[in-house]
Image (tube, rainbow, N blue to C red):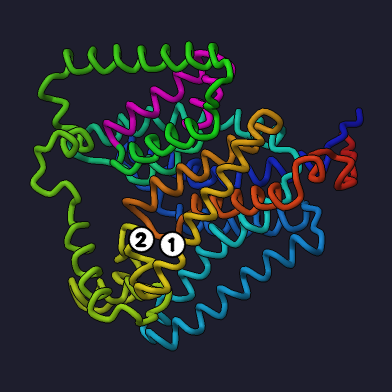
Amino acid sequence: MVISISKEKIYYELLCLYINLMMVFDCIADTFLFFDYRFTARSVLQKALYIVLFAALILSGEYYGKKLRKSFSIIGVFAVITVASAMATPEIVSILTRALTIFLIYFIGLIIFVPHITNFEKFLVCFEKYFVIDIIYSALNILVHNKIEHAYSMSFSYNSFWLSGLALIWFFKQGKLRYLFIYILNLISNLIGGARGGILCNVFLLFFCFIVIYHPGRKNTNLLIRTLIFIGLIGVGAIAALISLGERLLNLRSLFMLSGRSSDFLTGRGAIYAVLWKKILTIPFEFRGILSDRIYLANSFGSFDADYSFTSYAHNFIFEILYQYGLVLGMTILILAVICVVKTLKTVRRKWKQKNSFCIFYVLSLAAAFGQLSFSSSYLNTMNFGLAVAAVMVAMEFEKLGYKKRKFSLDRVNLKVNEVQI
């Protein structure tokens, strides 16, 4: 028997695994924790598999001059920034190799790979199989982190959001209740054993969906009905939970924080923001470079140590950018970023009817990046940031070339077909 497997299909499956790999490994780690063991080999195996996938995507992809040059130009600019950063803050050299390896995987890889997707409809279908893992992941997160009062998993909130958000949008589009079940289970799991940043991701998702999908004057009866069903089920579930759990809900970390019972809602972030802001205002024009906030925070709240410095960061992309690049240059970067996002949102809004599969990808990537980087992580080690930048790059190509000139078809790239003999 001969089975024909297109290079396009292989590429999409590899890229989908690349995006969901952290969730898969986190799910395995939670399985170990459920049985009171630790997945000690996780870090080494995960990095090794990322390197293998990176190489496989390079080999399986179809690369053309202009796209590759655009990606390498971004790499070149970042290389210059890195050298300047090392000169401005020499201490970053001690954590530079580790940081750049992660940045290569989570950011550079995605801005190389995502723009080569020629059919987002087919690409999003590849995520369907990972819904099963997300259901298991959500259940394990509840079981593992409900054992200890106020225990939580920040990685769950961000690693699972893309899939749960996709399930919610597909429910709105198709009205299938299984997608709503996936989303609600994920949301409950996040409230019980997740971080507040995951809730913020959902807020951004609804906000961007409203901007892109909703068009005044257009008949959206089905969408309205599904939205009301969603709100109704969430409301009924919330009331039932409140009645059945009562005060025990305050044992859940996110709800404990949101209820105002915590004396430090920002859990230490307020002190970080204050220290950074004071330094920014003291020397507003100083360029300190990438990773410099980690060095400064490590020295401010302890003593310099490479491992500690790597994990000490601003926990907010605005403070991170302003500290690293200075007030004036940082504000310029942020203003340009806002202009770019607004412009591409307008482009995506116009493309919703014709090519809504890309619009879904764009909305999810942007919501995940804004939600995560507003409260946690750094743009230097966040895959969601890489996805958002890659999505913006594709949207800008839409704007530049127009929808008719950019055809999402196999004919455009002349994909070859590999035949696998079985």
Q: Label 1: which residue?
A: 334
Residue 71 relative to residue 259: left or right: right
Q: Is residue 191 magenta-colored?
A: yes
Rendering coords of residue 138 (x, y %):
39, 30
Rendering coords of residue 46 (x, y %):
52, 54
Residue 332 relative to residue 283: left or right: right
For the question of whether residue 53 can be seen, the reply is: yes
CA gap between label 1 and label 2 equals 8 Å
For the question of whether residue 10 can be seen, the reply is: no
What label does residue 318 carry, if any? 2
Main secondary structure along the magenta-highlighted residues: helix
Q: Earlier in the sequence, mark 1 or mark 2?
A: 2
Please state which of the two labelled residues, at mark 1 or mark 2, is closer to the viewer: 1
Task: Classify mark 1: helix, strand or loop.
Answer: helix
- Look at 20% across and 38% down and name the residue there: 253
Q: What stretch is highlighted in magenta?
A: 164-193
- Look at 36% across and 83% down and name the residue there: 91
Task: Classify mark 2: helix, strand or loop.
Answer: helix
Q: Is residue 353 magenta-colored?
A: no
- Look at 69% across and 59% down and name the residue there: 55
User: Is the Cβ of the residue at disc 1 closer than 8 Å to that at disc 2?
Assistant: yes
For badge 1, the amino acid type reads Leu
Q: Residue 3's image quarter?
A: top right
Q: Please tell me whether residue 403 is drawn above or below residue 227 in the rendered image.
A: below
Which quadrant: the C terminus? top right
